[in-house]
């Protein structure tokens, strides 16, 4: 799950690292798996559902339903990037080449072309899409894939802008350096 979204909207939360899932814990989870988020009586599993709830609740969506659909498509592109990166890491040279030469450049180009003069993907405020792309750029930089951004200064500027935002700065400085999850 994307912790930056919680920090950006200043939501206080408790992160419990759950070891092996017991039958008792699984029985509380809709699909028997993590992550799991509770807000009062609401109990949600699935990362995208949790992030969508937070985005809607804390006004990280667009000006209308059409923009919201576009925002969601950019958020899902980040999932495509992560899926391709995992295949590149776990697979052979063919998957790595596909990631580096096809998938990543295509997605980064789309992100780059959408970032506007205000430094956002949509309008003049930070949206869920901005935070999702930030998270992906952050992860790619952490995994030493910075060469993917040689032709993408807007993506790097969006990353820098959010890294330096008061909402994320202290979180980013305090998180473990050896792991992103």
Image: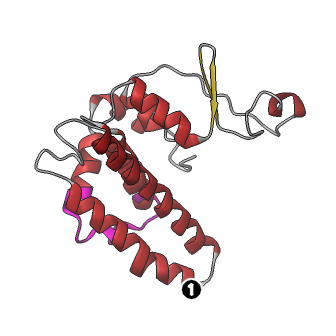
Say if 58 sits above or below 130 in the image.
above
Say if 112 sits above or below 133 in the image.
below
64 sits left or right of 145 in the view: left
Work out whether residue 41 can be spotted: yes
Kindly identify which residue carries mark 1: 93
Q: Image point 53% across, 48% down: which residue? A: 180
Q: Quadrant of residue 94?
A: bottom right
Q: Image point 45% across, 53% down: which residue? A: 76
Residue 171, image x, y percentages: 42, 33
Residue 157, image x, y percentages: 21, 52
Work out whether residue 163 can be spotted: no
Residue at far front of view: 65
User: Which residue occupies the foreground of this view, 155 or 24?
Assistant: 24
Reply yes or no: does residue 108 show up in magenta.
no
Q: Image point 52% across, 67% down: which residue? A: 85
Colouring rule applied to residues: secondary structure
Residue 181, image x, y percentages: 58, 46
Residue at far right of view: 23
Q: Which residues are magenta?
A: 141-155
């Amino acid at each position: 799950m994307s912790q930056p979204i919680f920090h950006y909207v200043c939501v206080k939360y408790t992160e419990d690292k759950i070891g092996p899932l017991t039958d008792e814990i699984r029985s509380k989870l809709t699909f028997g798996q993590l992550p799991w988020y509770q807000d009062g009586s609401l109990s949600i599993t699935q990362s995208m559902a949790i992030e969508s709830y937070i985005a809607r609740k804390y006004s990280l969506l667009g000006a209308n339903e059409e923009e919201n659909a576009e925002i969601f498509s950019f958020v899902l592109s980040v999932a495509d990037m992560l899926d391709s990166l995992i295949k590149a890491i776990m697979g052979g040279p063919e998957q790595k080449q596909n990631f580096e030469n096809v998938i990543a450049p295509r997605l980064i180009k789309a992100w780059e072309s959408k970032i506007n003069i205000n430094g956002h993907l949509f309008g003049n405020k930070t949206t869920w899409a901005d935070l999702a792309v930030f998270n992906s750029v952050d992860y790619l930089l952490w995994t030493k894939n910075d060469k993917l951004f040689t032709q993408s200064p807007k993506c790097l500027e969006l990353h820098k802008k959010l890294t330096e935002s008061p909402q994320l700065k202290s979180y980013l400085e305090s998180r473990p350096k050896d792991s992103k999850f």
